[in-house]
Image (tube, rainbow, N blue to C red):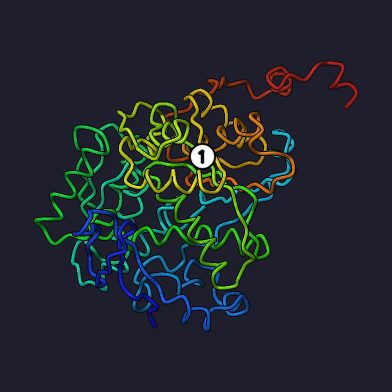
Amino acid sequence: MSFVKGLKCRECGAPYPVEPVAICEECFGPLEVDYDYAAIKTQLTREEIASRPKTMWRYRELLPLDGDPAVGLQTGCTPLVRAERLAAALGVGELFIKNDAVQHPTLSFKDRVVAVALSKAREFKFEAVGCASTGNLANSVAANAAAAGFPAYILIPDNLEKSKVTATQIYGATVVPVKGNYDDVNRLCSEIAGRHPIAFVNVNLRPFYGEGSKTFGYEIAEQLGWEAPDAVVVPMAGGSLITKIYKAFGELSKLGLIEEKQTRFYGAQATGCNPIAAAVKAGTRDIRPVKPDTIAKSLAIGNPADGYFATGVITNTGGWSEDVTDAEIISAMKLLAETEGIFTETAGGTTLAVTKKLIEQGRLTAKDRIVIAITGNGLKTQEALTLEDLKSIEPKLSAFESAAGFTRAATAAA
């Protein structure tokens, strides 16, 4: 049973039927899904959710499908890790990592949005799917399209990490590198969608696609014992994820599943691509596009589609946005790995580095219950790291002791 009433414009509120359209004809604002929350409230309880399988579909009343999902049946319910060693290193109390680096099937939060988008593509009877991507979305669309039997057309900037390109090609998708940055790729996808019957998940299916990100927020609240945290730090590329986590907490409160709480939202960007952070710091919601130049390629969107709405969430909740250098990103990736045993990609390094900066600024304190959103796996961006070259040793005990730094006195004591 679907609880979707239709689509509506996020700017002027104009209503639209449930169709593969993303832009309001009245004001050119973005469309979003409109739900019958009164009806959902009679169906969805904590007990009902707890009785369901541990996947993102346990919140299915709040997702825009008419029937059962066609793909991504095992996606969701990733760990919320109590990060005590990292908290001690940063000087805070309650610190949690929402770890979508272990997401099924392609190790990023994009599996959530793709599961919804491709399931909706099947309901709309599309026969092919596609996307514009900086890497993680390409991986997920290709993998889930293969599982669902869809031909997939993946357009990417021509400077992506080799590992992400390989992890897209392996699924048999048609992968097309485009000269330019993500914004050039996205414009081309919009033109293709206007001429060919392809379901581009972040173009003509964008209103439905974005709803999958809400499950990231639902899970945080449920895993915290049906409470919202004091603060969430979220990486920002197009800006959608931070707005959808905000929407998720609002929906849970509206349904009586959590107590109403003013969670503060903090946005993380790389200094080499920081249009949303720059707007927040300038006290404006007007986004000035930039040309990306950062190792955090999954965040390298210079003209973010949801930047205006992301700045609104950040400022209206009393949060803030910061950006960090490539060196700070790499340092944070190492810190997370060495304290919590979690290998994150450059986007996660960005998020943790910004968290560290926010703590130093006093914007996050030891009294806060903080959640850091880790959205992708470090295996995807190994090219960004330069680690110590390893040297072989002879198969002798003395050689090991020398290489490992064991002193003769310590060896004798042992």
Nearest the eye: 321 or 96: 321
Residue 400 in the image, given as x and y percentages of width and height: 70, 23
- In the depicted structure, whether residue 241 falls above or below residue 405: below
- Exactly how many numbered labels are in the figure? 1
Left or right of residue 56, residue 133 in this image? left
- Left or right position of 374 against 411: left
Check disc 1: other Cα within 10 Å, few if <14, some if 14-19, many if 20+: many
Residue nearer the viewer, 234 or 296: 234
Amino acid type at mark 1: Gly
Can you give x and y, in whole percent of width and height, for residue 120 in the image?
30, 69
Left or right of residue 173, residue 399 in this image: right
Going 11% across and 58% down the picture, which residue do you hit? 196
Please name the residue shown 41% across and 29% down the image: 295
Q: Position of residue 143 (x, y in %)?
A: 33, 56
Quadrant of the rendered structure where residue 396 is?
top right
Quarter of the image with the C terminus in it: top right
Q: Quadrant of residue 34?
A: bottom left
| Image point (48%, 79%), residue name | 38
Relative to 318, does residue 105 appear above or below in the rendering?
below
Instruction: Answer with left or right where residue 93 lies relative to residue 364.
Output: right
Q: Position of residue 218 (x, y in %)?
A: 54, 63
Q: Which residue occupies 51% across, 32% down?
A: 322
Q: Residue furthest left?
A: 195
From the image, tell me which residue sits under label 1: 348
Check disc 1 and report its element: helix, strand or loop. Answer: helix
Taking the view exactly as shown, the residue that stands out farthest to the right is 413
Along the viewing direction, whichever of 310 and 142 lies nearer the viewer = 310
Q: Nearer the viewer, residue 154 or 213?
A: 213
